Image: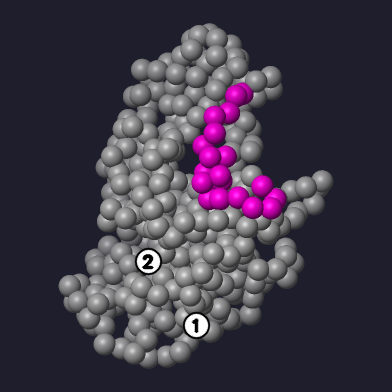
Amino acid sequence: MAWKWKYSPKDQLEDMSSLHPGLTGLQNLENTCYMNAVLQCLCSLTPFVQYFLSGKWNAALHEEIGESAIAFGCLVSDMWLGEFDFVSPEAFHSVFGKRYPAFSRRTQHDAQEFLICVLDDLHEAFKQVRAQLWCFGNYSCFLCLPCPHVFLPSRATDKELFKQLTLSNPSQERQSSAAGASTRSSSGTSIITHLFEGQLSYAIRCLTCRALSDRPESFTILSLPIPSTRMCSLQDCLECFFQPDTLTRNNQIHCYWCGSNRDATVKASITKAPQIIIFHLKRFAWQDKHRRKLSTTVCYPFSDLDLSPYISPSCHNNTEYSLCAVVNHAGDLDYGHYTAFCKHSITKHWYSFDDAQVTKIPDSAVQADTAYILFYTSQGF
């Protein structure tokens, strides 16, 4: 089932003659604000939109598993035609719910989990061999959904992860890491891996023999802890995520060289920076056996976000990013509502997307204490 966009690839966004391209609201299908907010953000990312509007995705599509990808492509078209004030995402929601039954119910869900599943589903549809997409961070949502992903713990609980690790022979580690990277590369890529996938490296050092081992892991979203209850910056969150950990007592790792469990330090760094990096702010946390929401104001830059302090020297990607979209969550755990702020790729103005309602907003309104997911695009692309 091939579907084609009426514009040629070279025309893409700038030559669109419709009245309101990319400024189309999405009907709420009953508690689907989480879905609408995420879809608006994805459909505001220029290289991602261009991929669908140019029709390139038809050639990569695997139709046997691509039903929801087809529905997503049609929805992108509807949202960029600009012929309607709002459209219904019913078709996409219906077919997506068949692959992820938890989202078929008309109940509130976590936007971050939905985003992970959408990226994974599109990746599957456009890639020949399945590759696991990762999200760094534990379940931060207030509804735990069955999801075919491996979630690594947040920096606050990384020790639980590394209790299961072994400090290996460095030569074996290098061979293993190279083989893993080769497997991912040789199996092909997708638009998702091309735009959203980055790589972290965990440097693990035994404090007894000083042996060092590197553990690479791919990611599409970085879940960042919020280190304050009142106010902090995105850089504060990043500092907290990338700060070194010391693993002792019950958290020791098994050192290959020492032949026993040893204290160790663990430090993460980015070895591959993606073109579009997504930050999930962990606003939902446990406190005294109860879930609560952190309403901390997190200040985030609109441009020149510098990731160089967290980048490995071996990474030669551009390290400065600009904000392009925000998923907001207002309210509490039980009665929340999701909206989106997106920077339009043509007008360069910011707009608020509240389900079917689309409103132009000043730049000052984009900085809000409701920010939940931040989308940044590299300034080098």
Q: Secondary structure at mark 1?
A: strand
Residue at image point 41% right, 64% down: 324
Is 95 magenta? The answer is no
Measured as percent of width and height from the top left, residue 176 is found at: 37, 27
Measured as percent of width and height from the top left, residue 283 is found at: 65, 55
Q: In this orientation, does residue 93 appear?
A: no
Q: Which residue occupies the extreme right position in the image?
A: 288
The image shows residue 8, relative to residue 188, as above or below, that is below
Query: Magenta span covers which residues?
Result: 228-247
Q: What residue is pinned by disc 2?
A: 45
Residue at image point 60% right, 46% down: 225
What's the distance in space between the residues labelled 1 and 2, CA to CA?
17 Å
Residue at image point 64% right, 44% down: 227
Disc 2 residue crowd, few under 14, some 14–19, many 20+, Cα 10 Å: many
The image shows residue 117, relative to residue 167, as above or below, that is below
Q: Residue 2's quadrant in the figure? A: bottom left
Question: Could you tell whether 106 is left or right of 233 in the image?
Answer: right
Q: What residue is pinned by disc 1?
A: 358
Q: Is 256 or 272 nearer to us in this picture? A: 272
